Image (cartoon, helix red, strand yellow):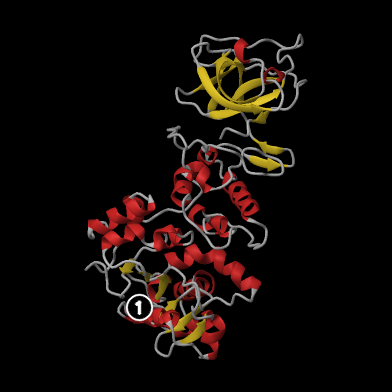
């Protein structure tokens, strides 16, 4: 056996044991097979030579995968499928029609989330949920059943476009085929994701889901980037279990969370945001509204809906922020720009939309919603700029900020920021401000909860 062939066999084994579903349905006899069975079935097909460099394990192991809206009851279960005692009914009919459609694509195996996961095993359930995006991506064909649609126009009102898990089931596969309620193909194309495929279905999917059609037909690249835009796609989707709002987005952002049903939707979503923040993409901070009830930080949004009313910020591409969640809150570097509270607004309590003046740039005015139980005058306000650069100007270090900057509205207990031991901020001849290191003798800066 040559070294190259041995390497291909090892790559094949690794792929089968780690990158396809734990079990599949063998279409020839409608029974379960495990990964080891699949490995033995295809291993003899691994080529001994790879003269043209086209061999990939994923091209050998082909399976179909189902995307659908679960029935309220009557879906076939793992236990029933294992025992070979599937009861007649709409759930069983759906499974049979899916397998029939899968055979049209010359695959020998199929997978459905209704019956192919042993949900009584917490270990298997955890792996399945974390791997779901990858399983859909590696499928030969994703068969989508739209149970409420007859025509392409009906997709606009189909429940499939409103469910949390079906977002990644739309984005992950390279090949996808839509079937209507009667299991009739909705287009004449073999792959409804092809760029040159019927544009009507892509345009309809864009209207129904809010996902740009180029993100659908192109090879969607998962990862913790464009967080604000991608969160907005999920904002109006619903899940039966509240934790699934977060779990269903793991694959889209390419992060991994321990599955802990019962922790609550808020806690699960906070953990998702914390995992995304580790990549440092500033778009994760581009949200509006009330903050989540996080134990240390007000910089985490409540849900994907917080990103709906976001501002379209065009920050410099490639910029990354160092963000770390600590026991004291979110740790990140900011440029603190003091704001002046207008004298006429320095008294009173309650929720107000106040226009603040910038002390360093008088031509900048910023609107901030504040809600105090004490008088507004009890606080010092500032803007914490996140996108800036430090440059040397001779012996001085100068902060440069872009024409389009973003930041957090902050406040702290009113204590004189510029004590006798520090220097007041000074403008410079360079675009930006001279860096002044202040003694932190005042209360901690906190993000204003009412603002994203």
417 relative position to 15: left or right = right
Q: Quadrant of residue 27?
A: bottom left
Give the residue at x 34% y 66%: 176
The answer to whether 83 is drawn above or below residue 320 in the figure is: below
Query: Mark 1 highlights which residue?
Result: 102
Local secondary structure at mark 1: helix
The answer to whether 165 is drawn above or below residue 323 in the figure is: below
59 relative position to 412: left or right = left
Where residue 194 appears, as percent x and y from the top left, is 28, 60
* Count of numbered circles on the image: 1
Q: Nearer the viewer, residue 416 or 304?
A: 304
Give the residue at x 51% y 46%: 305
Q: Quadrant of the C terminus?
A: top right
Where residue 155 appears, as percent x and y from the top left, is 32, 60
The answer to whether 386 is drawn above or below residue 204 in the figure is: above
Q: Nearer the viewer, residue 42 or 243?
A: 243
Crowdedness near tag 1: few (<14), some (14–19) or many (≥20) residues, C-alpha within 10 Å = many
């Amino acid at each position: 056996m040559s070294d190259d062939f041995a390497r291909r066999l090892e790559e094949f084994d690794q792929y089968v044991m780690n990158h396809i579903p734990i079990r599949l349905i063998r279409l020839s006899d409608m029974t379960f097979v495990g990964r080891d069975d699949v490995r033995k079935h295809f291993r003899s097909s691994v080529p001994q030579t790879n003269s043209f460099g086209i061999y990939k394990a994923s091209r050998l192991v082909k399976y179909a995968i189902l995307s659908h809206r679960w029935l309220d009851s009557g879906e076939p279960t793992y236990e029933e499928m294992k025992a070979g005692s599937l009861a007649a009914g709409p759930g069983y009919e759906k499974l049979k029609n899916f397998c029939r459609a899968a055979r049209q694509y010359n695959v020998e195996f199929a997978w459905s989330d209704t019956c192919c996961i042993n949900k009584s095993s917490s270990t298997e359930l955890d792996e399945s949920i974390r791997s779901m995006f990858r399983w859909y991506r590696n499928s030969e064909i994703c068969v989508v059943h739209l149970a409420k649609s007859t025509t392409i126009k009906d997709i606009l009102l189909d429940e499939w476009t409103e469910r949390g898990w079906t977002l990644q089931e739309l984005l992950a596969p390279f090949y996808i085929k839509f079937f209507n309620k009667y299991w009739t193909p909705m287009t004449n194309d073999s792959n409804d994701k092809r760029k040159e495929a019927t544009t009507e279905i892509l345009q309809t999917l864009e209207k129904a889901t809010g996902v740009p059609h180029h993100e659908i037909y192109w090879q969607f690249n998962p990862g913790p980037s464009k967080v604000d835009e991608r969160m907005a796609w999920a904002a109006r989707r619903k899940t039966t279990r509240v934790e699934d709002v977060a779990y269903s987005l793991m694959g889209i952002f390419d992060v991994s969370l321990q599955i802990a049903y019962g922790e609550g939707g808020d806690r699960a979503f906070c953990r998702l945001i914390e995992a995304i923040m580790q990549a440092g993409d500033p778009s994760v901070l581009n949200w509006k509204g009330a903050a989540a009830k996080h134990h240390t930080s007000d910089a985490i949004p409540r849900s994907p809906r917080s990103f709906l009313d976001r501002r379209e910020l065009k920050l410099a591409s490639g910029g990354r922020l160092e963000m770390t969640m600590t026991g004291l809150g979110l740790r990140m570097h900011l440029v603190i720009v003091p704001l002046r509270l207008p004298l006429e607004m320095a008294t009173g309590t309650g929720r107000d939309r106040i226009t603040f003046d910038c002390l360093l740039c008088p031509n900048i005015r910023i609107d901030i919603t504040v809600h105090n139980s004490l008088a507004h005058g009890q606080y010092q306000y500032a803007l914490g700029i996140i996108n800036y650069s430090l440059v040397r100007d001779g012996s001085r270090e100068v902060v440069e900020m872009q024409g389009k900057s973003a930041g957090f509205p902050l406040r702290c207990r009113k204590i004189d920021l510029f004590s006798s031991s520090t220097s007041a901020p000074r403008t410079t001849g360079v675009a930006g401000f001279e860096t002044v290191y202040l003694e932190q003798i005042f209360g901690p800066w906190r993000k204003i909860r009412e603002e994203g």
